[in-house]
Amino acid sequence: MLPRIDYIKQARIKLRLTQRELATLAGISTSMINQIESGRCKPSYETAKRIFEVLGSHEGKAAMKAREICNMKLISIQKNEPLQIAIEKMRDNSISQIPVFDGSKVVGVLSEDIVARSMIEGEGKNFLGRSISMIMEPPPPIVDGSTPAKALIPLVRFTKCVLVSERAEVVGIVTVSDTLKMVE
């Protein structure tokens, strides 16, 4: 089943294609695209299918990728550093979570929620001097930079952050606020 014909114009404009470009890619005339979009002509099933295939393939190419919305200023901390250092980094950089590394390997994440929960549960006298590894949570998901940004929205809502890698190296982080870049 194909989408509604009136979606053609909306999709073409959203993808920033001209009528001429869409017509060329679909193998039909520009005037045919114009007539379809204005409602003066109903395309055959095969023509409509071809147009929607072109729009679909361009949508995948035009969709924002994880590397385009991630924050490349990755602020991180090593697992054996004291909690006080992590809190200072989070406060100084206005971030609510920070990836935890062991050397160059991601081993966990520390968030405001985790710190607050640990404070409430009474972690003892030397709370700020404790190693991050004692309260960190499991590492966030790591996705390739070419992952469609739309796919990250449900993931970020659940995990609070997603790390982005390029050539097996973590290069950025995506948080809920970074996903708002898709609507700009």
Image (cartoon, rainbow, N blue to C red):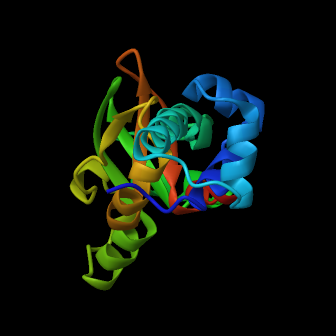
Provide residue 99's location: percent of width, then percent of height.
Answer: 40, 45
Q: Left or right? Give the position of 27 relative to 36.
A: left
Task: From this view, report whether residue 44 is shown above or below residue 119.
Answer: above
Q: Name the residue located 31 percent from the left edge and 48 percent from the top edge.
A: 140
* Count of picture labels: 0
Q: Name the residue located 28 percent from the left edge and 55 percent from the top edge.
A: 136
Provide residue 2's location: percent of width, then percent of height.
Answer: 39, 55
Q: Name the residue located 45 percent from the left edge and 29 percent from the top edge.
A: 146
Quadrant location of residue 170? top left
Q: Residue furthest top?
A: 167
Provide residue 92's location: percent of width, then percent of height.
Answer: 67, 55
Between 104 and 88, the one lying in front of the other is 104
Q: Name the residue located 40 percent from the left edge and 59 percent from the top edge.
A: 156
Between 166 and 11, the one lying in front of the other is 11
Q: Left or right? Give the position of 91 relative to 138.
A: right
Task: From this view, report whether residue 109 is shown above or below residue 113.
Answer: above
Q: Is residue 79 visible?
A: no
Q: Left or right? Give the position of 2 relative to 73.
A: left
| Quadrant location, the C terminus | bottom right
Q: Residue furthest bottom?
A: 120
Provide residue 67's location: percent of width, then percent of height.
Answer: 54, 33
Task: From this view, report whether residue 113 is shown above or below residue 52.
Answer: below
